[in-house]
Image (spheres, helix red, strand yellow):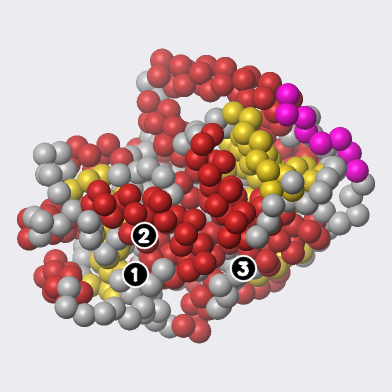
Amino acid sequence: MSNFLFPIETTSRELDHKILMAILAAKQKRKVIVGDQQLIRNLSYFVKNGVFYGKHLFGKPMFSDDAYYKRLKSHQFNLVHLNEEGAVWPGNEDDWKTILEQAERPSVLDASDFVATWGEWQEKFNINREETKATVKCTGHPRFDLYNRKYNEYFSNETTALKKEFGDFILVNTAFSYSNNGENGVKFIFKKTLSYDAKNSEHRKYRFKRWKNQMFSIASIVELVNQLALIYPEKNIVLRPHPSENSEYYEEIFQGIDNVHVKYEGPVTPWLLACKLLIHNGCTTAIEATLAGKPVVNFSNGSTDDYDVYLANICGVTLSTNKQVTDFIDKLESGEYETIINDQKKAHSLFENFRSIDTAKNVLNLLEKADEGKGESRGAAKVKIISLSLLHKLYLFSKYSYFILTGRRGNYLDYKKRFECFDKVKIVEKVSNMSKILGYDVKVTYCSKQVFVVERS
């Protein structure tokens, strides 16, 4: 019996693709445990023999906090690392290299581990950066496979409900973690870390320029939303903040405006499938909307080109004035839209999903290789998982209380926003729907609001 650990940090972004991969990976004598990354971390003290899949093993830059990793290795676990935000980087190629150097360091890993990358560019950079024993392999990201038409039925109930509530709405997705940080505001952005030291002039130049750029961008997007709400009073405009942002910021700005709705609930995919148009400024969802065949506007008014997010901003059309956006919307009403990806050669090297509609099989191949040659050991018992879940609830209660009592409400809200607890009915329904699409017979064991297990029937 091998145990596959699938941790989740941000439910809305990760849950559906983790369900997809859990069903594909489920085999006889294998448990796939999907849960809150903090609970999975605690569970790792008690389970042995398996594969850890995701990015949540390291919390600090350059894989510098390796205690969790070493514990898993001592328990006969191999790693398949896949970043949730690979290839969606601001700036130019030199900036991308700096960001990647901070984000991950494959040389820390063992020969039995794997690093999956979003594209060939990231694969080549990691291989050439320094000698590494781990296998670095371009796979793409299975999350984006979900925009293949065969998965539309999986989201149909949610998509239908959104269309019924909001009609042909305009979706505005933001990604302003510097100018509107949800954890602790500018205090979080400018605190000393391995990647930022105020004594380092280069660190300061980069951090302040990026913060300034986002301050201009967020003001421009907010003003655009207000203009659209005035010009199209019959249209609903849904603003969906990035998981790292403070949603209350937008709620306070748009209070009293009936056709502007600030929503951060559920996965983004149904929102993209249901919307008439996506407007963004450097958000990953531009890629997802393009794969879904939706019109995309990259609104760049107020920002500089220095920290444009290349991969997101080559999707769709780039517009810089409110008038250009309203003209584009008016044209959409009278004609069809053709999906646009500019600079395809470079885009394809950064992002395998532009070339392949089934990257899940690439990641599954690495998961299978990571599990090769492992002997049998006792699987994680349900009673043990449930017991840990109860302890985890006590831990969360004490953590929340500590945040509130110490005036760190932002930390409390950030965690609650990122991890939306699992609803039993919805989890069972999601696993059932996905298994029907894939043609696999699996069973799901709901253990708590923080964890469930997928196995082959």
Q: Amino acid at mark 3?
A: Thr
Q: Mostly what secondary structure, the magenta segment?
A: loop
| Residue annotated with mark 2 | 272
Query: What percent of the width, then of the height, locates residue 19?
Result: 60, 50
Question: What residue did someone put label 3 on?
Answer: 359
Secondary element at image label 3: loop
**Picture quadrant of residue 246:** top left
Residue that mark 1 sits on: 294
Q: Is residue 405 left or right of residue 35?
A: left
Q: Secondary structure at mark 2?
A: helix
- Alpha-carbon span between mark 3 and mark 1: 21 Å
Mark before the other along the chain sequence, 1 or 2 = 2
406 lies above or below 54: above
Q: Earlier in the sequence, mark 3 or mark 1?
A: 1
Position in image of residue 169 (x %, y %): 23, 58
Q: Amino acid at mark 2?
A: Leu
Disc 2/disc 3 C-alpha distance (Å): 20 Å
Q: Quadrant of the N terminus?
A: top right
